[in-house]
Amino acid sequence: MDLAGLTRDLEALRDEVVSAVAGTQEVSALAALEVDVLGKKGRLGVVLRGIGGLPTDDRPRVGAVANAVRVAVEEVFQARGVELRAKELEARFRAETVDVTTPGRPIRRGSLHPIVETAGRIAEIFSQFGFVVHEGPEVEDDLTNFQMLNIPPDHPARDLWDTLYVDIDGKLLRTHTSPGQIRVMHASTPPIRALLPGRCFRYEAIDASHASEFFQVEGLMIDEGTTLGDLRGLLDQFAQAMFGQGKRTRFRPGYYPFTEPSVAFDVECVVCGGSGCPACSRSGWMTILGAGMVHPVVLQYGGLDPERYQGFAFGMGVERIANLRHSVGDLRLYMENDLRFLEQFR
Amino acid sequence: MRVPLSWLREYVDIQLTPEQLAERLTLLGMEVKGVERWGAEWRNVVVGELLTVEPHPRADRLHLTTVSIGSGEPLQIVCGAHNIAPGQRVPVALPGAVLPGDRRIERTEKMGIASAGMLCSGDELRITSDGEGILILPADMPLGAALVDLLGDVVLDVDVKPNRGDALSMLGLAREVAAVTGAPVRWPEIDVIESGRPVGERLTVTVRDPDLCARFVGRWVSGVRIAPSPDQVQMRLLAAGMRPVSNVVDASNYVMLEMGKPIHTFDAAAIHDGRIVVRRAVAGERIETLDHVERHLADDTLLIADPRGPLAIAGIMGGAGSEIGDATTEVIVESAVFDPISIRRTGQRYALRSEASLRFEKGQELRLARIGADRTAQLVAAWAGGAVAPGRVDTNPEEPREARVAFRPSRVNRLLGTALSTAEQRDLLRLVGVATEEAVPASTTIVIAAGTRPLSVPAGTTETLLAVVPTWRRDILIEADIAEEVARVRGYELVPAMLPRTPTPAWRPDPLELRDAVRATLAGAGLTEVVTLALVSPRHGEVFGWSSADIAARGETAAEGSPITVTNPLSSEHAILRQGLVGSLADVVSANLRHGLQDMAIFEIGKGYGRSGEQAIEWWRAGLALTGAGDPAAWNRPARPVDLDDAKGLAEMLCRSLGLEPSWTALADEGVLHPGRAARLAGRDALGALCLAGRVGELHPRLLEAWELRTDRLVVAELSVAGLSGGALPGVRSTPPPRFQASERDLAIVVAREIPAAVVEAAIRSAGGELLRTVTLFDIYQGAPLSAGERSLAYRLVYSAGDRTPTEQEVEAAVAAVTASIAAVVGGRIRS
C-alpha cells in the first residue's frame, strides 16, 4: 500500500462514516457504529494497521492525515450523539407527560380533639409560670369533693353542683377538679404551683350550654406570700396568651365556699370586642373562670397552717375556653364526635 | 332575683342609669345577669278616659264605649268588661299595638260595630293578675301618654350568691347600692296600729324542738276582707316574678321580697283553740299541702301543728286546711326562724323548694322575725282592713348583738397584695355597715378559720381592730372575710396586677408527656381523636365486657371488678361508668355511619372504671377503631378495605415509637372479637418488660349486628401502655450505623400450617447467633408441591458485625444452625 492509496482509503472511510452517522436514528445504533469504526478492532484501526508497510519517511504524513480523519469522525459521532439524545429525551417526555392538574394520591390526615388540645394549651401557658400538671381520680370521695373544700353536708352552696352519686358508699363523680387541691397539698409541700386538668360530671340536662360530662382545669399556687394581686397578674397573662395581646380583662368578686376572697374573671367578648352582642348577653364581657384565695379551712384540710401559708386557686371550663377559641356555639359538638366537625381541628 | 328598680328606689336613691347600676353591682359581687325593660312589650298602649259606656245594641255582654286619648276624635271601642264607668282612666291599645304574648291589636268589627282598639285588663298587659276587669288607672295619669312611660320599669336580674341570703331582698340590695353610692338606706316605717283583744289571749305558740325553730313570732289580724291587692302591689310582685294571690297572701310575699323574711299566714279559724305547736312529725302523719298533694310525713320533718294535727310543713309549704281563702276573716301571721339544714333536707325530701325555703336555707337573723311579723301585720291591715291585735307571741324575744371579728390590717394587705392604710380599710368597711373598734381587749383572738376546722391565733403585737358586723351579715366570720369586704367595696379592679415573686417549686415530670406523644403518633398516622362520655348504658358492659383477665402494661392499672353504677342517673343510657373504650368507639362509628360517612379511623385515650368491693379503680387505655377504606379510593386507584393488618401495623408503629418490640399471639374467643381474627399484642422494652399490652382484632360479626353497625368490618384495638396514666416518654439509646457490609440469606421454611409465624420467627431468632440482625417475613406460600397441611414461610435474614464484614464461612455456619434448630423446634424443613 502506498501513501496515496492509504490516504485515499482514510478519506473514503471518513466520507462513508460521516454519511452513515448522519443516517443513524437511535442512540444505540450510533453507539454500535462508533464501536465498529473507532473501537479497538474498528475499521479505522484496520486501515491504520497499513501504516506499518509504508516507508518510514511517509509515516508522519499519513499519521497526520489519519489523525485528522479520527478527529473529524469523532466530532461527527459526538454531534450526532447530542442530537439523538435530545431527540430521544424529547420523545420520552412526550410519552410520559401526565395531567398534572389531577388530585394527588390521598393520604389520610388525622386530627386532635379540640378539648384535649385546649386543655393542653392551658397547661402549656401556665407551665411558663412554673405550674406542673397533677391528676386525680374521677370517682371521688364526698370528703375531698365537698367537705374538705369547706362545703359540709347540707350546705346551701351544694346547689352550685348537682351531683351524680355512685353505688359505693361515700363516693361520687367529681363535680369539679377542685378536690385535686386537697390531693396536691397532701402530696407536696409549698411552694406549690399545680395545674389539674380532668373530666368532671354533673347531674345536668344536656343542652347547648350544659353538659353532664365536661372538662376543667384547676390551678393552685401556695406559698407564704402569694396574693390576690398575683392571681390577677397571672390571669391577665393567661388571657393575653390564650385570646391575644391587648385583650381587656375584668377582675370582680365571685363566690366559692373554698376561696375567700373569691373572684370571677371576665375577658372582653371575643365576638363583639366589648361593644355588646347576644354572645355576651350585651355586657361586652365573657366570664372565663372562677378563682380566689384558698380558704383557710381548705388549707387546714390540706395539712397546711393557714396563718403561715396562703395562695390562690382558679378553675375554668375547658369547653368554655375552646368555644371562644374556635367559635363553637354548642357544647354538644365536643362529645357528639361527628367526624365532620372534629376533622377541622388539624 | 328579679329586682324592679322602681321598688328598689323606695329604699335608696339611685342616680345611675340602669346599665351603670348593673355594672357597679356586678363589680361589687352582686352579678347582674340581665337588664329587662318591663313594659317594653306594650307598644302603642296609651292612657285614655272613658267618655261614655253604653250597652252594645246587639250583644248583651258587650259594652260600647267612647274613649278620649287627649287628641283627635274620641275613639269608639267595644269592651266586654263590666267594671268600667265614664270618667275612669284606662289603658287603651290602639290599632297596631302589640301586647305581651305577641298579641296584635287591629281595628275590628264586633257584632256589626267597629272597634278602634281595645281596653286592656291588667292580665292582658301582664302587670296584674286580674283578667276579669279593665285595669283602672290613677285619675292623675296624663291622657294620651304611653303606658310604658308611666308604668314601665326596669328589672335587674341579680345573681345573689348562696352566702349572701341577706341580699335576697329589695332592702338587702338597697344596702349594696348604698355601698356603691354612699346614699343612705331608707327603711319602711313600720307603724302598727293595734286594737282589740291582745294576741296573747288568742294565740299560744309552743316550740317543742327549739333546735329546729330558734324563734317564732306570731301576730293576729282580725276582721280582714279578702280581695285583690292594690294594683301597684300586684305590679311589683309580678315584675319581681311572683304571682299575686290575694291581699293577705300578697302581704306576706311582699315582706319576703322587701326584707328577705319569709312569712306564712294562716286562716285562724282553722287552728284549733288558737294553739300552735312547732314539732317534728310523728311517723304516719299526713298533710295535704297547698298544692293539693297528700304528703306522708317523715319523722324528722318540722311541722307547724295545732292540737289536732299538722297545719304546715315548717318553712316549706302551708297546708290546704288552713289556707287563706275568700271567707277568711281572722289571720295569724307566722314569722319564724328555722334551722337551715333541716329546711334544706325537708325541701329535698319532698322535692319542694320555694322562694321561702330558699331564704330559710341560707339562714335568717333572729331580729327579722320580729320586724317581719310587724311589717306583715301592718300591710295586711292596710290592704285587707281589719284590726291588728295588740302585742306579739314571741318564743325567743332576745335578739343577739352584733358579732365582733378581729382583723389585722397588715394581714388584709398581705392577702390582697395591697398597701391600704388602716384608715382606708375602716372607711371601706363603713360603707357596708361594718363599724370598727380600736379598743381591743387583751384576750382577743384572730379567727383564721371557722366552720368544720376552726382555728384562732392570739392577736399578739400586730395592730388589730375589731369589726362590728351587722346582724344580717352572717357570712362575715373570719379575718379573710374582712379582707374580701375591703377588696370588694374598694373594687377588685384596684387590686394591683402582679406576677408571682415567690419561690418556684422544684421540677416535676409532666404526666401528660407520654399520653400526648401517643396522641401525636396516632393522629400522625391518620387517626382522628375522639372524646366520648364515660357514662354509658349498662348494655355496654354486657356487650363489650372482656371476659378474661385483663393484662396491663408495667405500672398501669389492670381492668377489674364490676361496673360502677350511678345511683341517680340522668337517663338509663348513662347509668354506668364504662369499663373499656371499644363500646364508646363503636358508638362513634355508628353515629357517623348514620351521617353517611363510610371510611373512619378514630382513637381515644380515656379511662375505664370498675369497682372492687368498696374500692373504685380507674385505668387508662388507648383505643382505636377502623372501618371502611384503609387506603381511600382515588381517581386512579380503587379503595382498599381496612383489615386486621392495618390495626396491627398501627399498634406495631406505636410500639416502635416507644422503643418497644411487638410480638403477637392468638387471642382466645371472648365473644367480642372475630374468633379467627383476634390477637394479643405484647410490646417489650430492651430489658423484656411488658410496656404495652392489649388486644387487636375484628369486631365479632354478632356485635356488628347487635350494635346496628352498618359496615362489613370494624377493626378495633384497646391497649394498655406503660406511662399512659402519667409517665414520661422513654429515652432513645442510639447505636452508630453499621460501617461494614452486611450479608443477606433467604430461607424458605416449610412447616405445618397451624404453626404461627411468630413461633417460627422466634425459633430463627433463638438459634440465629450473635451476627443475626434482622428477620423479615417476605412471603407465605401454600399449594403444590407442598402437601395440603403445609405452608412455606420465606424469611430474609441479615447478618452483620460491628467491626468487620462477616466471612462466608461464618454466615454459612449461622444459617446451618438456624436450619438445624427449625427442624428440631418447629419440625420445619428448608425448601430449596
Image (tube, rainbow, N blue to C red):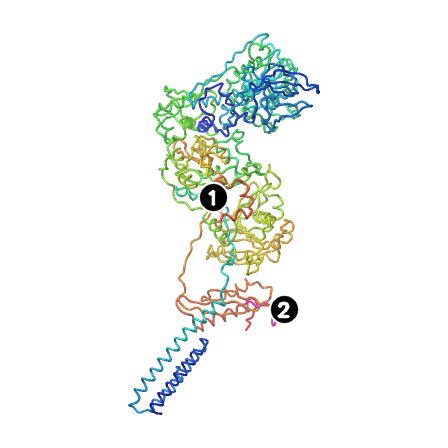
Which residue matches tag 2? Answer: B788
Q: Could you say which quadrant of the image residue A55 lies in?
A: bottom left
Q: Is residue B471 left or right of residue B133?
A: left
Numbered tag placed on residue A128 in the rendering: none
x%, y% of residue B557?
52, 47
Which residue matches tag 1? Answer: A118
x%, y% of residue B622?
52, 50
Q: Main secondary structure of the magenta part?
A: loop
Q: Is residue A130 left or right of residue B554?
A: left
Tell me if residue A315 comes above or below residue B160 in the rendering. below
Q: Residues within 10 Å of mark 2 (few under 14, many from 20)?
A: few
Residue span colored magenta: B783-793
x%, y% of residue B331?
61, 14
Q: Between residue B456 and residue B633, name the one nearer to us.
A: B633
Residue B280 belongs to the span the image colors magenta: no
Q: Is residue B350 left or right of residue B15?
A: right
* Mark 2 and mark 1: Cα distance apart in space: 58 Å
Answer yes or no: are tags 2 and 1 on the same subunit.
no
Question: Badge 1 sits on which subunit?
Answer: A
Tell me if residue B586 comes above or below residue B423 in the rendering. below
Tell me if residue A18 comes above or below residue B290 in the rendering. below
Spot the residue most to the top.
B196
Residue B346 visible within the image: no
Q: Between residue B81 and residue B489, name the one nearer to us.
A: B81
Spot the residue most to the left.
A57
Q: Could you say which quadrant of the image residue A211 lies in?
A: top right
Residue A328 visible within the image: yes
